[in-house]
Structure formats: C-alpha cells, structure tokens
Amino acid sequence: VQLQASGGGLVQAGGSLRLSCAASFSIYRVGWFRQAPGKEREFVAAVNWDGERQYYTDSVKDRFTISRDMAKNAVSLQMNSVKPEDTAVYYCAAQNRGSMYYDAGAYTYWGQGTLVTVSS
C-alpha cells in the first residue's frame, strides 16, 4: 500500500494551492491531516473513495475542497483563500473500512508529508 502526496509549496495569503494524494490501490476513505510546528496533528478533510461524501474541519470549510480524481486514482485537496495559520506539513492517509473520519488513529496507511507555507 502506497500513498504519494504532492503539491506543497510556498504561497501568499489569499492565494491557492492544490495538493494531490495518489493511491496504489482502492481503499474506503482518504483523509488529509496537517501538523504545524509545535502542534498536534489535526484533521483537515476526508472523502470516501467513491467520492460521494466529503468531510471538513470547521476552519477550512468554504475554503478547501476535497475531491476524488477517478482517472488518476487520487484525491485532491484544493486550498483557496489560504491563511498563514494553514502553514503546516500536510499528510494524506487512508482507511480500509469506514471509521471515524476525523481520527488519525483510524487511518492505517500514511503518505509522506508535504510542506505548505503561507506567507503573510
């Protein structure tokens, strides 16, 4: 099982960035988590593999969009109107079966992190 995260970088506040997470096989759900320096890892967004249900933490609702790219067997996280507080290492993770979408412990597989830096 492999998850490959990409798309991080430096962006100005108010700008946009798109993260992608490619999976080597089909799973039940993919989630994005982030960890800022000195803080705990937190849930950002998740989507079921069929693309039917999406979940977001309150701080990114109406700014971030998670979606399933069927052709690429991947999940994207479109980040719009980014803020300095969005700065973190972003991780994608996968569940084999339905469980608490917001709980990092419920995800079995993890990709490497990709750094997102938002300048003010």
Image (tube, rainbow, N blue to C red):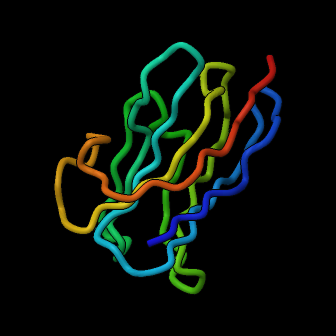
Q: Is residue 99 left or right of residue 82?
A: left
Q: Is 38 placed left or right of 56 in the picture?
A: right
Residue furthest out toward the front: 1
Residue at left 56%, top 39%? 63
Q: Nearer the viewer, residue 29 or 64?
A: 29
Q: Quadrant of residue 53?
A: bottom left
**Residue 18 picture location, percent across and down:** 68, 53
Q: Position of residue 92 (x, y in %)?
A: 49, 52
Task: Report the front residue among 115 and 13.
Answer: 115
Residue 26, given in percent of the width and then of the height, sits at 38, 80
> Quick check: 42 above or below 111?
above
- Which residue does the image show at 33% across and 49% down from the upper left? 55
Q: Position of residue 83 (x, y in %)?
A: 66, 24
Q: Residue furthest top?
A: 38
Q: Is residue 67 above or below residue 16?
A: below
Q: Quadrant of residue 88?
A: top right
| Residue ID at (44%, 39%) | 44
Q: Quadrant of the C terminus?
A: top right
Q: Quadrant of the N terminus?
A: bottom left
Count numbered badges in the picture: 0
Please give left or right for residue 74 compared with residue 103 in the image: right
- Residue at the image point whose x is 82% and y is 35% from the top: 10
Q: Nearer the viewer, residue 24 or 88?
A: 24
Relative to 81, say whether 76 is above or below: below
Residue 88 to residue 85: above or below: below
